[in-house]
Image (cartoon, rainbow, N blue to C red):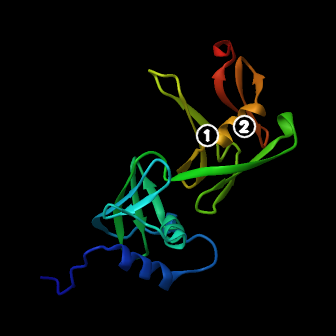
Amino acid sequence: MSGQKTVTPSAEGLAASINAAKTRGLPPVHLWNPPFCGDLDMRIARDGTWFYEGTPIGRPGLVKLFSSILKKEGEDYFLVTPVEKVGITVDDAPFVAVDFEARGTGKDQVLKFFTHVDDSAVASAELPIRVERDPETGEPSPYIRVRSNLDALIDRKSFYRLVDLGAHHDGWFGLWSSGAFFPVIPSADLP
């Protein structure tokens, strides 16, 4: 044996590690590459609700804390600290964009989104908006990149408001933000 104590990952242990290492702003999770410690029974539902051992986490501050150490590698999601990395389940996108503000019009328009965990992101070439359509129903699922390979599902009320700001460009109906055009649907597919 190596003499090291075996650690079983837990939400409480992760929260304590985060609080101990807490600095201003988001932690530099992109710089952390600790050893994988196993999976944690934690899940983020499509509506942005975080669950631990099947029970919703009812403390918004704790959800925000965990969201600050979320990392995506390939198609897998992890909570990471400088010393441990645990796998979690994400049903769709880890965040939900619950509102946005628009400044300017046309190509000069800037769209800034706000998530349920108090992140914000300005849509741009680096933080794109994308819309996936269900192949059977055609229903759109719009997303905005929030940070480091992590997306937010744009909620329905915000998406309807975005559609009102849409424009046609190169055969597509879509949105302008920060000088970039984000296609939503081919113009020919609109009634």
Q: How far apart are marks 1 and 2 (CA)?
A: 10 Å
Instruction: Identify the disc placed on residue 162.
Output: 2
Relative to 52, say whether 4 is above or below: below
Percent coordinates x, y for residue 161 in the rendering: 73, 38
Percent coordinates x, y for residue 1 in the rendering: 12, 82
Pointer 2 local density, CA inside 10 Å: few below 14, some 14–19, many at least 20: some
**Residue pictured at 70% horizontal, 46% vertical:** 123
Nearer the observer, 75 or 47: 47
Relative to 174, say whether 115 is above or below: below
Instruction: Identify the disc placed on residue 186.
Output: none
Residue ID for mark 1: 156
Percent coordinates x, y for residue 81 in the rendering: 43, 73
Using residue 101 as the reference point, say whether residue 132 is left or right of it. Answer: left
Percent coordinates x, y for residue 179 in the rendering: 79, 39
Q: In the displayed image of the protein, which residue is found farthest to the left? A: 1
Nearer the observer, 67 or 52: 52
Q: What residue type is labelled 2?
A: Leu
Mark 1 / mark 2, whichever is N-terminal: 1
**Residue pictured at 60% horizontal, 48% vertical:** 145
Quadrant showing the C terminus: top right
Pointer 1 local density, CA inside 10 Å: few below 14, some 14–19, many at least 20: some
Using residue 188 as the reference point, say whether residue 109 is left or right of it. Answer: right
Q: Do the CB atoms of the residues marked 1 and 2 lie less than 8 Å apart?
A: no
Relative to 181, say whether 138 is above or below: above
